[in-house]
Image (tube, grey):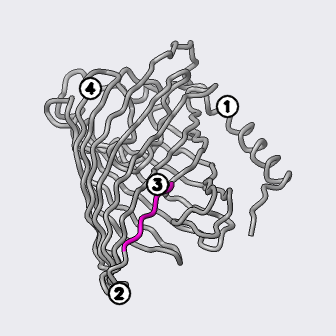
Amino acid sequence: MTYYVSKKQINLLFIVAAALIPFCGFSQYTEIINSNRPGLSVSAYALGSNVLQAELGVGYELRDHSKLATESELLSTDIALRYGLFFETLEISYEGTFDHQSLNYLNTGVEITNSDFSRNRIGLKLLVFDPFRNPNRNKPNLYSWKDNNKFKLKNLIPAISIYYGANFVFGDNPYYKGENVVSPRAMIVTQSRVTSKMELISNIAYDRIGTEFPEWNYTISLSHTLNNPRWSVFLENQGIKSDRYADILLRGGLAHLLSNNIQVDLNFGTNFKDTPSRIFGGIGMSYRLDMHEDKIRNIVH
């Protein structure tokens, strides 16, 4: 089955985009690189206009499947390219993961290898709500460090973004046999600044729409900046539900800022079942090419 995007769907997308333009006049740019690594969650905030960012990583994974009696090793290469488009809140991104898998069938001694993209997609993300849009309503207390750093219920009010994109499967991909060449992907992203050092991000995605195996996917990520602000740690929970594959994964790791435009990271994780069991880890880096220019903006009171 091949999925076609109708003219009616395209027109609806343009109508929605036009309706959201009034929300796009406030800045997302930050002086320090804003990377989605080392986890898999996507932040609600865009890079800011004319910012180009590359996020690269390599990983290693062991899998054992108790029912199929298989063992496998995977070497993976991750790449994400992100660019801030016309508005401060609009971002286009490409995400790709190329895997090389050695799969061993224990009962027969047969070993095969698979190499192809397990992730290959492009999409647009637009911030539609930011609780910190008006800085006059979020001024720090100049007389109280405790007040500025304590937990407040209003901090749970999240920034909200919407994402729409597409997956691409080319040739005889062993990870998605018989799947459509193009399939849509939609996602809602939220991000809360729990404290001055802690961020809570959630992603809820409906993926591979229109294929034989559509997929629901959620990711919840909590990151914390350490006393040395160049270091941060994160903990992330991901759930996947599809007739092809379902799982719950837990990953963690740390990131270090080498400069305002360069970040390096380390991650590791596992799942909680044996069909298959998974243990994985990886390292990576993010680099930002900053061509941003500040624009005068109006603050809504």
Q: Is label 3 in a helix, a strand or a loop?
A: strand
Counting the numbered discs, the total is: 4
- Residue located beneath label 4 in the image: 141
- Residue located beneath label 1 in the image: 22
Instruction: Give the mark, 3 or 1, whose residue is nearer the N terminus.
Output: 1
Evaluate if marks 4 and 3 touch, with contact meaning CB atoms under 8 Å apart: no
Evaluate if marks 1 and 2 touch, with contact meaning CB atoms under 8 Å apart: no
- Residue located beneath label 3 in the image: 203
207 relative position to 266: left or right: right
Q: Residue furthest left?
A: 227
208 relative position to 230: left or right: right
- Residue located beneath label 2 in the image: 67
**Residue 183 sits in quarter:** bottom right
Tag 3: amino acid = Asn
**Residues at marks 1 and 2, CA–CA distance in whole angstroms:** 54 Å
Instruction: Give the mark, 1 or 2, whose residue is nearer the N terminus.
Output: 1
**Residues at marks 2 and 4, CA–CA distance in whole angstroms:** 59 Å
Nearer the viewer's eye, disc 4 or disc 1? Answer: 1
Instruction: Give the mark, 4 or 3, whose residue is nearer the N terminus.
Output: 4
* Rendered residue at 31%/44% (across/down): 194
Examine the rendered structure and indicate whether residue 41 appears above or below residue 280.
above
**Residue 5 sits in quarter:** bottom right
Task: Determine if the magenta segment contains residue 157.
Answer: no
Q: Residues within 10 Å of mark 2 (few under 14, many from 20)?
A: few
Q: Percent position (x, y) of residue 261?
A: 35, 22
Evaluate if marks 3 and 1 touch, with contact meaning CB atoms under 8 Å apart: no
* Rendered residue at 62%/33% (across/down): 23
257 relative position to 128: left or right: left
Nearer the viewer's eye, disc 2 or disc 4? Answer: 2
